Amino acid sequence: MKRKTPLYAALDLHSAYSVLGSMDHSGKTQPRMRFATEAERLRAQVSALKQKRRPVHLTMEAGALTRSSQWDRAAVGRAADHLRAAAQSADPFQSDQV
């Protein structure tokens, strides 16, 4: 049986809206999705990635929302096959704006 290649996804959580992007193993990207930061919406968006019937590797930004509570991880539940929280830089002068 051929092993399915994973789908890689990144979730940027903010207090009002979040952004979810994904890329397959060959580098083909899907359109980014922007949605309200609510547990049900989060679960639905990540679950939609599973419709592609591939393992989903999800990385979430470890910002204030992920450090102050575990609601985001609980919301994702089993929608992602692999879940990783990426730590933010301790550098107070770092800016994610381009």
Image (spheres, helix red, strand yellow):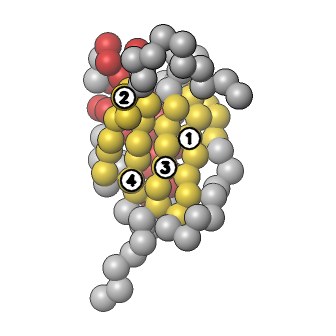
Mark number, residue 20? 1
Q: Which residue is mark 2?
A: 87
**Front tag of 1 and 2:** 2
Quadrant showing the N terminus: bottom left
Residue 94 in the image: state x and y as whole percent.
54, 19
Disc 3 crowd, CA 10 A, few/some/many (<14, 14-19, 20+): many
For the residues labelled 2 and 3, the Cα–Cα distance comes to 16 Å
Badge 4 vs badge 2, beta-carbon distance below 8 Å: no
* Precedes in sequence: disc 1 or disc 4: 1
Badge 3 vs badge 4, beta-carbon distance below 8 Å: yes
Q: Which residue is mark 3?
A: 9
- Out of 98 and 74, give the one closest to the viewer: 98
The amino acid type of the residue labelled 4 equals His
The amino acid type of the residue labelled 1 equals Leu
Q: Image quarter for residue 91?
A: top left
**Residue drawn where x is 59% and y is 20% of the image:** 95
- Helix, strand, or loop for circle 1? strand
Q: Which residue is mark 4?
A: 57
**Residue drawn where x is 50% and y is 26% of the image:** 13
Badge 3 vs badge 1, beta-carbon distance below 8 Å: yes
